[in-house]
Image: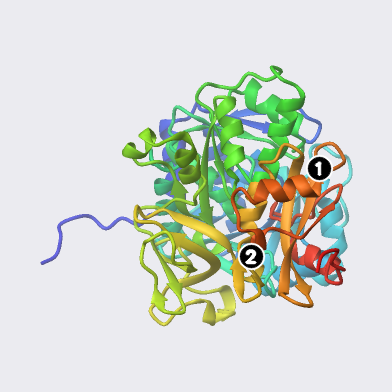
Amino acid sequence: MKSTMMSCPLLVRSMIERAGKLFPAVEIVSVKPDGARIRSTMRDLHCRARQLSAALQQAGIAPGDRVATIMWNQHEHLETYFGVPAIGAVLHTLNFRLHPDDLAYIIRHAQDRFLIVDATLLDVFEQLRSRVQFERIFVVDHGIATLPAGTESYEAFLASTAGGPIYPDLAEDDAAAMCYTSGTTGVPKGVVYSHRSIALHALALSLPDQFCFSRHDTVMPIASMFHVNAWGLPFAAVMNGSRIVMAGRNLQPAALLDLITEEQVTLICAVPSILQALLNTTDDHPGRWRFSDRLHIGVGGAAAPESMFRRFDKLGIELIQGWGLTETSPVATVSTLKPLMRDLPADQRYAQRARQGLALPFTDVRVVSDEGEAPWDGETTGEIQVRGPWIASGYFGGLQPDRWTADGWFQTGDVATVDADGYVRITDRLKDLIKSGGEWISSVDLENALVAHTSIREAAVIAVPHPKWQERPLAIVVPKNGAIDPAALRAFLELRFARWQVPDDFVCVKELPYTATGKLLKTKLRQDFANWQWDRP
């Protein structure tokens, strides 16, 4: 028996068309390079996205063609999120913090035709210009007098067409956007998102038990718009008719805090390293910033420690942990409490909130160990695997097909447990686990415990070769006041860990290395400390 329901494709352009009609006066705030705040509306976004669509069509961009961007979180970037896929083209946001060699490889592999680049990032483009070929390059020039040779003004390009776009018939499974992984586990790999996957991800992301936002919210994606579509927030915010704040290039903690408070932002999403900097800055200037009483924060990209939840609670701000990867669009799980859990003792509540959480609707998760699929007992550890309507089924160009199982699950490379309530807890990356004397040690658990100590600002734990135990955990820490007491740190950790799990040595550094997307760069640390000489046998 067939249903009598209409079959209407889920398309990205439906989001912007709806916002332009139903929420035309909703404000969009965008911070320019000089710090000025430009205020526009959803009506402006709708009109300019249509202008971009029409100009691209007139310039010969066809469905399936790739249009690349090198831009900050700014209103022009938001226009490309909708103007490019509306005509069936594919938006390719480039991570401009990658090495020029990686960027050139990605551009060539994706076969990008056009580039839209912010004038303040032209130096990035110039480093790779001789190694790539774009047919046309458009510069968001901010009124600069002279454009580099071979480039054109983005504003002039928008103004070059008088009519509107001719929207092609699109299928919801057509490509809309693509991002590449950062290449920390081999060459960067492209993930292509469909209109359907973006739409369903945006709907799920907005639900009350996920990141919980609506037309009544002011949304500020701090996560970069080149990083997995800023976690899908721009799409979901436009779909909902939410007020949007774009932070631009200045991500210094004080500037972000000023923006959050002055614009009374109610939802931000960021990686733990950014949030840690915000917390430290508020500690240094108590009482300086007054946040909206509705402000809540989504955190992801790395595990947030329990101490971070406690610190934000003291500010009256709810922290919500999510988990995912480029291949999962990215949000696959979110940790919000079930009703009965709110009556748990405080320590148990924080431990539960610090888990990666429950799978989003329509997303399935399982943990697979050497013995097969693991039970949901919170104890059995294995690789977490996922499937769902916004989970990639392969990489662009067919790279690395062995990341998917024969029965269609994506193998994430994250090691996890799932408890009886269905909450995922990531214990480590497969490549970051420490095997000492034949037993496994979680670097993530040690790191989260260390940053809860009053003398530690940041911490990383890595495996270092050991003549007797094969590997031992080495802790690399950024102290708050320039010095640490290793014996005190060992005693502190032994309250939660067996003695053999505790790092033997602690190294102080001024800062830790991070990837372009704010993740701890443990490959660099392993290289730096590969020849470590142990003080203890």
Q: Position of residue 105 (x, y in %)?
A: 74, 72
Is 7 above or below relative to 372?
A: above
Quarter of the picture containing the C terminus is: bottom right
What residue is at 56 percent from the left and 37 percent from the top? 309
Q: Which residue is mark 1?
A: 479
Quarter of the picture containing the N terminus is: bottom left
Q: Which residue is mark 2?
A: 180
Q: Amino acid at mark 2?
A: Tyr
Tell me which label, 2 or 1, sits earlier in the chain: 2
Figure disc tally: 2
The residue sitting at the left extreme is 1
Q: Position of residue 298 (x, y in %)?
A: 54, 41
Is 414 above or below relative to 485?
A: below
Foreground tag (2 vs 1) = 1
Q: Residues within 10 Å of mark 1 (few under 14, many from 20)?
A: many
What residue is at 45 percent from the left and 27 percent from the top? 216
Measure how far apart labels 2 and 1 are at the Cα level.
Answer: 34 Å
Q: Is residue 114 left or right of residue 168?
A: right
Describe the colour scheme in one phrase.
Answer: rainbow
Q: Is residue 40 left or right of residue 200?
A: right
